[in-house]
Image: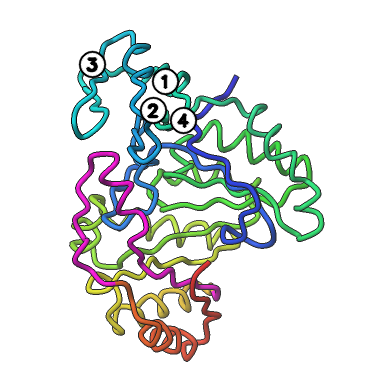
Amino acid sequence: MTTALVNNIQKYSIHDGPGIRSTVFLKGCPLLCAWCHNPESQVFQPEIVWYGEKCIGCMSCAEACPHQALKGREQGIVIDMERCVRCGICADVCPTLAMERLGKEMTVEQVLAEVGKDTVFYEQSRGGVTLSGGEPLCHKEFAVEFLKRCRERGYHTTVDTSGFVPEHVFDAVLPYTNLFLYDIKHLDDDVHRKYTKVPVALIQRNLRHIVEKGANVWIRVPLVPTVNDAPEHIRRIGALMRDLGSTEIYLLPYHKMAEAKYHRLRLPYTISHIAVPAAEQLQELAEILSRQGLNVHIGG
């Protein structure tokens, strides 16, 4: 059976494609974007996290751990990552859900059964199912089978992608994908490598490839002040879209709501000094793109 590591299945999602949707978040991503709002989906394996605000100090997690990876300290539960095998037993016994195992191996059938509970919402809102991540196309076999089965059920299918996968992966999912939500972080390779840890050339090639193949694509730009919000850079993105014949672009304002996740996962949050974009700036950048003939959306 084809499986993938599922991080979350978000119901009643209205920001990941048209209508009301179920968004399936798969775990693992080749990019390490400094502003990623789902850092728990970056690693290609399960993770264990502790929520101090939920913990009652009963120590049931530490007592149940077969590898003695959990210790009670003054600051709370400390996880010894060298001992921890991420089995999730601590999360299973925690009475207050203060311990959580991020990532669950699920089959296509299991995920279909879950998203199938919301079929009535898809039908009434012209919504459907979105495959996201992480980078969902890193799980090629799962993505192809899942999207194909969704189309057989009549679901509208959307893939939310960074574009950083081999071209043949896009060719495999194209027949079963109604819409791609395609991220553009930065057009300059040096800047892209600095903030995402990967080069940009493959992403741009794949974008052109799927557009030429007739894919429906909405461009999404995570707008991060001082990184990619210069008016000239936004004009370049608009010019690229005009060249490709794409018209739908979403500006996604940077926010700091994920910062607590980084601390919980013991990851550095390197852009805490960056302020969120002002509404006036967002409107100015949207107007630049509108004057280039694009349909601009802020957020979503």
Task: Tell me which numbered mark, 4 or 3, is placed earlier along the sequence.
Answer: 3
Q: Which residue in the protein does label 2 denote? A: 46
Please tell me which of labels 2 and 4 falls first in the chain.
Answer: 2
**In this image, 9 relative to 123: left or right?**
left
Q: Name the residue at 25% across, 25% down.
A: 79
**Front tag of 2 and 1:** 1
Asked whether 109 or 217 is in front, the reply is 109
Could you give the CA–CA distance between mark 1 and mark 3, rounded to whole angstroms?
13 Å
Give the CA separation, mark 2 to mark 1.
9 Å
The residue that disc 3 covers is: 83
The residue beneath circle 4 is 96
Residues at circles 1 and 3 in contact by the CB criterion of under 8 Å: no
Question: Is label 2 or label 4 in front?
Answer: 4
Q: Which residue is located at x 34 percent, y 33 percent?
A: 50
Three-letter amino acid code of the residue under disc 4: Thr
Instruction: For marks 4 and 3, give the CA distance.
Output: 23 Å
Range of residues picked out in magenta: 247-275
Mark 1 vs mark 4, foreground winner is: 4
Q: Amino acid at mark 3?
A: Arg
Q: Measured from the top left, where is residue 195 in percent x and y?
A: 23, 57
Residue type (three-letter) at the residue carrying disc 1? Gly
Q: Name the residue located 23 percent from the left edge and 27 percent from the top edge.
A: 78
Q: Based on the displayed image, in which of its 4 quarters is residue 270 positioned?
A: bottom left
Q: Is residue 294 magenta?
A: no
Can you tell which of label 4 and label 3 is closer to the viewer? Answer: 4
Whether 32 is drawn above or below 300: the answer is above
Q: Can residue 34 be seen from the camera position used here? A: yes
Q: Pointers 2 and 1 in contact (CB under 8 A)?
A: yes
The reply to whether the magenta stretch includes residue 266 is yes
Percent x, y of residue 165: 40, 45
